[in-house]
Amino acid sequence: MRFPLLKYALAVFLGGASYGAMGTVAKSAFAAGFAWPQTVMSQALFGTLLFGLAFAIEALRNRKAAPMDARKLLRLAGTGMVTATTGVLYSIALSRLPVAVAITLLFQFTWIGIVIQVVATRKPPHAAQVAAAAVIMAGTVLASGLLSSDVDFASFDLVGIACALLSAVSCAAFMYLSGRMGSDMPPFQRGFFICLGSLAVGVVVCPGYFPSGVLFQGIAGYGVLLAVTVLFVPVLLFGIGTPKLPVGASTILAASELPCGILLSFLVLGEGIDAVQTAGVVAILAGVAIAQAPTMRVRARRRDAQARRRSDERL
């Protein structure tokens, strides 16, 4: 592929879309009688097992692991703790706020990622990134159903609002760390140590997980689904794409989470989608396309330059 940035952008886009399954799977687990600390722990446990199995298979195939030291281990585990913290904070927000409000606040990670990029690089963001973030935030308000619902703003829980906003900060922080921690390591080895950090958070929020016997009461199926969609696929794809992209671009591409989440809730849970929400989904996808406009222009210029060189060579 002559212009691999699109490949990396697609990886982040698909990683964000995989996150979209979290709401549907978590709601199904809650409906089955499981509490959010149990789902967080199950997600971390099975994510660690999946990456551990993949890592072991790689080792058996004589693929050498990257050397590890205490500093690298702590950095990767810390990255895992950050993404697990996002899940914890968002779960608390969902338990205290309407879903429309919680998801709208979570999606503030789009512009927070751009702020992190500006602080880290000390350079202003590209105009396309700012425009894309604005379009995505407008689309998020529409797609969340916040405008089409009878919402009592005065009744919002302040703790829930704080947790939702903090989940946006930790989500943007994970995108930043994902592009910088262990990017030179084999993906399954990297993912395994990231998941160890998530598992540590899971044990803290649900210390009675194993003694309760919940593992044998049907939560395993939900845990595997959450592990695949919230840890295994995103950690793998973000590990491929985010090191090659600016933080702001990565958080914008990860906005694919909401359209995917709405589609799955419609298909699996039977939740309705009205015209306003559909317009919001279209706006979010348009925002992602706007963010990629500079990349497409550069690709077109390079393609034209190559065509001119080939034409000159034939002459």
Image (cartoon, rainbow, N blue to C red):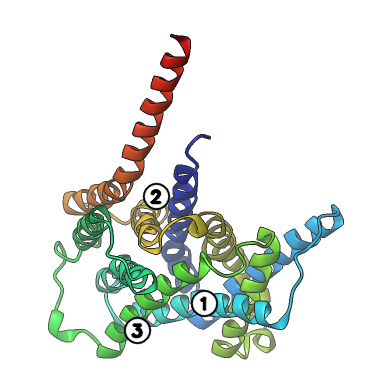
Instruction: State the SS at label 3.
Output: helix
Classed neighbour count for the residue bearing mark 2: other residues with Cα under 10 Å, few (<14), some (14–19), many (≥20): few
Give the answer, above or below, for where 93 lies relative to 55.
below
Real-space Cα distance between discs 1 and 2? 27 Å
Is label 3 in contact with label 2 (beta carbons under 8 Å)?
Answer: no
Q: Identify the residue at image location x=38%, y=69%.
A: 121
Give the answer, above or below, for where 289 lies relative to 236.
above
Is label 1 in contact with label 3 (beta carbons under 8 Å)?
Answer: no
Position in image of residue 297 (x %, y %): 31, 38
The kind of residue on which mark 1 rests is: Ala
Q: Is residue 148 left or right of residue 199?
A: left
Classed neighbour count for the residue bearing mark 3: other residues with Cα under 10 Å, few (<14), some (14–19), many (≥20): many
Q: Is residue 226 left or right of residue 185?
A: left
Instruction: State the SS at label 2.
Output: helix
The kind of residue on which mark 2 rests is: Leu
Query: Mark 1 or mark 2: which is in front?
Result: 1
Instruction: State the SS at label 1.
Output: helix
Specify whether residue 232 is in view: yes
Mark 2 highlights which residue?
267
Position in image of residue 259 (x %, y %): 34, 53
Residue 118 figure quarter: bottom left
Position in image of residue 76 (x %, y %): 61, 75
Q: Identify the residue at image location x=27%, y=73%.
A: 105
Labels 1 and 2: the sequence-earlier one: 1
Between 126 and 239, the one nearer to me in the picture: 126
Mark seen at residue 163: 3
Mark seen at residue 84: 1
Classed neighbour count for the residue bearing mark 1: other residues with Cα under 10 Å, few (<14), some (14–19), many (≥20): many
Q: Is residue 309 left or right of residue 60?
A: left
Is label 1 in contact with label 2 (beta carbons under 8 Å)?
Answer: no
